[in-house]
Image: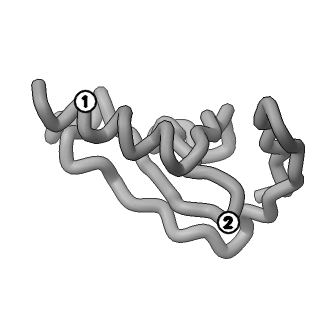
Amino acid sequence: MPSRVYRHPKRTCELDLNNTRWRKSSRSSDQGDQCVEVASTSGAMAVRDSKDAEGPILFIDHRDFQRLASAIKSL
């Protein structure tokens, strides 16, 4: 997997995702139709569709990801 560029309002960095450990979200569907994987990188949390591992990746600042995860868990 090639490097991806992470753009943050205060910084931009290139992240090498070749050795990134992805894990399937515990909230993903068992049928495989709604699968999300997350990975922690040095610059941000990465989120992708597990059915399209080479597709787009959403990068979210670590603090913002914690707030998002807390909000999802409270549902």
In the picture, measured across the screen, residue 1 lies left or right of residue 25, that is right
For the residues marked 2 and 1, what is the alpha-carbon distance in whole angstroms? 23 Å
Q: Nearer the viewer, residue 63 or 60?
A: 63
In the picture, measured across the screen, residue 1 lies left or right of residue 67, that is right
Residue drawn 39% across the image and 60% down it: 23
Residue drawn 49% across the image and 46% down it: 63
Q: Amino acid at mark 1?
A: Ala
Which residue in the rendered view is the most extreme toward the front? Answer: 10
Q: Amino acid at mark 2?
A: Ser
Q: Which quarter of the figure has residue 6?
A: top right
Q: Which residue is mark 1?
A: 71
Q: Which quarter of the figure has residue 50?
A: top left
Q: Which residue is mark 2?
A: 42
Q: How far across and how far down the image is residue 48, in percent?
A: 53, 40
Q: How far across and how far down the image is residue 18, in percent?
A: 73, 68
Q: Residues within 10 Å of mark 2 (few under 14, many from 20)?
A: few
Residue drawn 76% across the image and 58% down it: 1
Q: Secondary structure at mark 2?
A: loop
